[in-house]
Amino acid sequence: MLNISHLSKSFNSLKAVDDISFEVDKGEIFGFLGPNGAGKTTTISMISGLLKPDSGKIIIDGLDQDTNIKKIKKLMGVVPQDMAFYEELTAKENLSFWGKLHGMGKKTLNERMAYLLTKTGLSGRENDPLKKYSGGMKRRINLIIGLIHQPKLLLLDEPTLGIDVQTKLNIYEIIQEASEKDSTVIYTTHNLKEAEELCHRIAIIDNGKILAIGTLEELIQIVGEKDIVLIQGNFKAEQASQIIIQFKEAETLSLKDENIVLSVEASKEIPVILEGFFKAGLPVNSISIKQPNLESVFLKLTGKELRE
């Protein structure tokens, strides 16, 4: 459904997107995982036609964006981070406007509108102006606007930003349903749990580059089957590094003052590593051990934690 080849975009000296390539299949929920400033929104903006790439190709449903942008825009639904509606208008008026803009007939539009308002728990509030809606309700309307015409390609730029858990689950359900009905979804997020729970495949992006692409299981293989161990204590990063370097089986995923994250076989290596800390006179306050996950993959690839 979507084929991106060697896509790049710079803003003056900043390389926002740096020669990325990937493909997304029909009906797939494809996650773009990375911190703020990683290049996620710039990529979405280029796919949607809002920004022109410096170089590279975008093919959507077999159509080259360079020569078929009008046809492509009819296939897409876009849900930006910022709210894209008229607050003075009611939900019904907003949805009618956007539905008609996509060429929807009155009967189809009304049926689709009623279904989505019910699905999102907004039925009964369709005649209220959106300025009276809560933040979570506005997020739901923002999503419905992108879905109203049942697009073949749905671009979602952090659609659950700053909302409550119940609204987030509600949005997950709608996105999964769209995927089941063969809409292809590009979903940007900096939330590890979202990516793990929602996306069929995930691209990890940082500093404009895609570092890895795969299913959750495929990405975890990058770390391997060893345990992920966090050691916290009153020590400097350099001090901890001098101890860990002695153990060839221990891989350092993150190293900072007062904490270090390792990929090791915990039952075998941790007692020996702790003995090294104690002999060096470095206090250890706590140890936590967990199985490899998306967070540990991100740590291994970037050397830093992905924070909210």
Image: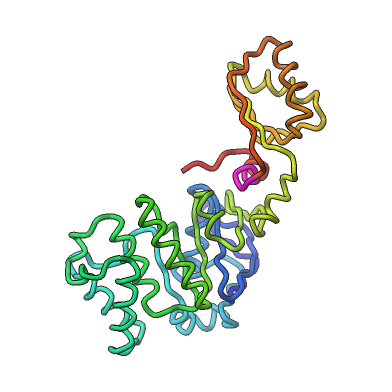
Q: Nearer the viewer, residue 252 or 209?
A: 252
Q: Nearer the viewer, residue 49 or 88?
A: 88
Residue ranking furthest to the right? 248
Q: Is residue 235 left or right of residue 278?
A: left
> As displayed, is residue 162 above or below residue 244?
below
> As displayed, is residue 228 above or below residue 247?
below
Q: Is residue 294 magenta?
A: yes
Q: Give the main secondary structure of the magenta stretch.
A: helix
Q: Is residue 154 left or right of residue 263?
A: left
Splitting the image into 4 quarters, where does residue 298 fall? top right
Magenta stretch, residue numbers:
293-298
Q: Position of residue 43 (x, y in %)?
A: 52, 62
Quick check: can you spot residue 38? yes
Residue at position x 39%, y 61% in the image: 170
> As displayed, is residue 272 above or below residue 34?
above
Quick check: can you spot residue 257? no
Q: Position of residue 121 (x, y in %)?
A: 30, 65
Residue at position x 46%, y 43% in the image: 308
Q: Nearer the viewer, residue 262 or 99?
A: 262
Q: Position of residue 265 (x, y in %)?
A: 76, 34
Residue at position x 71%, y 19% in the image: 274
